[in-house]
Image (cartoon, helix red, strand yellow):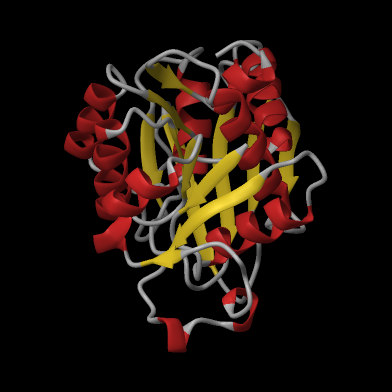
Amino acid sequence: MNIAVTGATGRMGKSVIEEILQRSDSTTVSFATSQKTKNELPNHLSSVEFPICTPSDFSSQLQESNPDVVIDLTVPEASLFFAENAAKFSIPIVIGTTGFTEEQLNKLHTLSDEIPILFEANFSRGIAALHLAINSISGILSNYDVELTETHHNKKIDSPSGTLISLLDTIGKSRSNLDPTYGRSGINERKPNEVGIHSIRAGNIRGSHEVLFAGNDEMITLKHQAESRGVYSSSAIDSAIWLSNQPPGWYGFKDVLGVPT
């Protein structure tokens, strides 16, 4: 399985490459992209055997290397560019980028008519289990207040995170007319359908998500804490291997796991 990796010098791109190089299942890096020139590449890329190209050369490198699948964890504008080029050569792409506008997501959905696209905000198996847990109790606790809190490193640019938005969507499956409130200030009483959303950005924290249900003199807290980026990169690679055998369409990590969407 030959995998092209975009954003090789980013946090997640680096983690994906390191994970592929450590695996024993015949998975290899076909090529990687980086905005940096060869002389500027960090140590983890200085002695690799696979090609490293700039994004502007992505299309020609796709044609030359012909990877089985692409893994992209960059930024929305770049992800859309990579997906459009992958579609030109009928190559599946896994996208773990967050922060897309509705228009950008619509363009990706259109491209999924041509190639398999797996789009996921979070590749953690624990987060997938958290969605299942929320699904099972949210309806039972339909009159309870809900608060969502997420904590990420101080370099994360989108707030709230794609993962937190997906958790809110899961809660919305069993509740109608949700009223997201992003942080609080002033003197305001809590509204009946309000869902408090709190985003913390500090240090080098990998990622933490907490869902609080409170009511009837009791409190239930569901929390997921990631201790390593390998949590995400290993599952992104598993997703890429799975996606390479799928027909054109729109997929998520839950499809890989075979759990309800």
Residue 53: percent from left, percent from top:
38, 66
Whether residue 123 is visible here, answered yes or no, is no
Residue 86 to residue 209: above or below: above
User: Residue 102 lies in what quarter of the image?
Assistant: top left
246 relative to 223 in the view: left or right:
left
Image vertical order of residue 182 relative to residue 26, above or below: below
Horizontal and vertical percent position of residue 81: 24, 48
Q: Which of the image's four quarters has the N terminus?
A: top right
| Residue at the image position 62 percent from the left and 16 percent from the top | 135
Name the outermost residue toward the right: 24
Give coordinates of residue 260: x percent, y percent.
61, 10
Residue 215 position (above or below residue 165): above
Q: Pick out the residue farthest to the front.
A: 64
Residue farthest to the bottom, as pictured: 39
Which residue is found at the position 23% from the left and 42% from the top?
Answer: 101
Residue nearer the viewer, 154 or 95: 95
The answer to which image quadrant residue 193 occupies is top left
- The residue shown at (63%, 21%) is 256
Residue 113's x, y, as percent? 28, 16
Q: Is residue 31 visible?
A: yes
Q: Front-most of 185 and 88?
A: 88
